[in-house]
Image (cartoon, coloured by chain):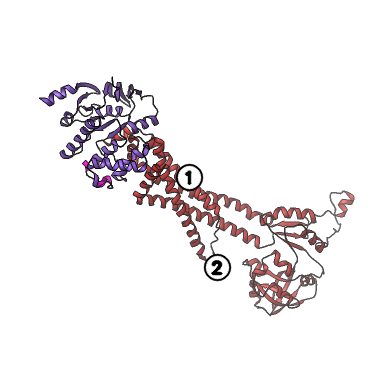
Chain colours: A purple, B red
Amino acid sequence: MTVPLIEARHAGRVLHGEITTTLVSDVNLRVMPGEFVAITGPSGSGKSSLLYLLGLLDIPTEGDVFIGDRATKALDENHRADLRLAMLGFVFQFHFLLPEFSALENVLLPMRALGHLNDTKKRERARELLTTLGLADHLWKRPDQLSGGQRQRVAIARALANEPSVILADEPTGNLDTVSSAQVVSILRKIVDEEKKAVVIVTHDPALAAKADRQIQIIDGRIAKESSPKDHAATAAS
Amino acid sequence: MTLIFDIAWTHVTARLRQTLVGIFGVATGIGFSVMMAGLLEGSQKDFIKQLVDSMPHISVTDEQREVPIQPATKEFDATEFRSLSTETERRGIKNPLALMEALESWLPGSVAPSVTTKALIRSGGRDLAVSIIGIDPKREKNVSKLESQMIEGQLDSLYKASNAIILGDGLAEKLGVTVGASLSLATTKGAPVFARVVGLSHAGNRMTDDNQAIVLLKTAQILDGRTALINEIRIRADDVMAAETLANRVEKQVGYKSTSWQESHQDILSAFQIRNAIMVMVVGAILLVASFGTYNIISTITHEKTRDIAIMKSVGLRSATVRSIFVFEAAMIGLAGTLIGWILGYTLCVLVGMIEFRSGFTDLTHLPILYAPKHYALAGAVGLLSSLIAGFFPARKAARVQPVDIIRGAS
């Protein structure tokens, strides 16, 4: 049996503030290679919080999140950062690019931090990624010189830079017009189909969710409904 | 490491206006503390210099520190005597030439003999009581500033005429005489002596300039009625600040009262300690204010980058890496600010040093500025340190933040 890329085991996240808030509760979830998973649910349901847990941006208060077969809850910050750098790529609703750096430099950032390739190879790869995403003419533009869709594609290029096994995207089309949205979705789909990476997106857009292999509906921090790839195939066929 | 440098450099150059404000903030702080330190310490040094120059560093006079013990006291061990005439001491230092020779053999400095006495100057119907100082011009040049204070003639002019005299310029004005005039000197002890004015001196001190006349040793001795009298030996120490210790040694050796400039200006010097404390406080306060300014600007720059910190951390940069970026930025701003601050400080010192002061009591003067590397080092160290601290703490705080908290806030 293949090892899941990311696995949540009874993962929960409770915020202890003036009022104790449960963001995520007892979630069991496996993300397999070549899977496109959509996490849906009403706003405030905890779907983003779940994504942050899966992406090691946050630490579960209950249960654990495994990357491969590695438990991550007990890891220190540096280890978690290193795992994010090498294994995971993020795309957020807002582009979250460094504003003073060009598109190319933004894509170079994770590669330079990882330091696996030499400088020429890094540049080649960054150029290649941006070209594939249709940004060949915008390599040296800063984020404020790009449109929303272009920025989001730069963010995707950056997420792909270190060849992570999983791309995590939080409302990647939330701020985009329909044309750009469709572009982003087809890119993500391609990543799954052609590169056998896993993609996990959080969205409340049913059209986008429908493009996924698997839909997981979150209500009040729990998994309320899960539709299998077969169901998806069945719905697609009908 | 190059990644850290590149990001820091890009941040600093991309936000040029903000960076310049930061650099200028550091630079003004450093510049003004350098200027104030130079001004305060300069005026202090200048004041001490004037004190020191106004008189010999050490003066050995024909006095004893203790009240002389009368022979009857020694003889009878009595506590009180009445109707006894006391033994008066002969004035003057005994065997001055041998004594000077003995001092010169070890003392790091120069030695010159002098005679001080009082006389009445009579000129054109005007009488003025003045103090007469008899000197040896050749030796005097080594121990006092007299030579440089001559405004007309030279010390050597004293050799040009018999009974030549150099007057303070204030005195000459009071008497209404100029160089070449002759006047008569009278004392209680001898016959009046006719003297010729061969020079004028200006010490810049009214007490001296209005009341002092300089003659040759021989002339002063004649006026005092005693040949070979020397009642003061003046010493100029090579190291001004060592005068006090030297004076003690001299006193032990020769037995006469030796007064260092420190001792004769004790009151002023103790006032100086207070001034010193004030100076340290003023410069300290400026540095403190400057470092707060630095802290403020740099920590603001860091705070504004919180979002970037979250981005870098979510991508997978370690906290330490992110922190280094901001400390590096602070260091760059601090370093540039320090360099510009030094230039600014130096320029301010030069400018302030050019301001002229003219008052009724003193000559035309400039503000005294001390150019000391230690001021630059101190101000630079404080500036750099506060920049680093200002970069470090907000960066550490920001780097500790879980990126998810910022991402949540932003979306």
Q: Nearer the viewer, residue A157 or B84?
A: A157
Determine the chain carrying the residue at label 1.
Answer: B
Left/right placement of residue A96 relative to residue A234 reads right
Q: Which residue is mark 2?
A: B364
| Amino acid at circle 1 | Leu
Residue type, numbered disc 2: Leu
User: How many discs mark residues in the rendered view?
Assistant: 2
Quadrant in the picture for residue B171:
bottom right
B286 vs B113, left or right, is: left
x, y percent for residue A208: 17, 31
Instruction: Find numbered disc 1 in the image and state the secondary structure of the residue it sits on.
Output: helix
Name which of mark 1 and mark 2 comes first in the sequence: 2
- Picture quarter containing residue B299? top left
Distance of label 1 from label 2 (alpha carbons): 41 Å
Which residue ends up furthest to the right in the rendered image?
B75
Q: SS of the residue at dot 2? A: loop
**Quadrant, the N terminus of chain B:** top left
Instruction: Find the magenta span and give its range.
Output: A138-149
Q: Nearer the viewer, residue A113 or A13?
A: A113
Residue B54: horizontal and vertical position, in percent? 65, 63
Residue B385's tag is 1
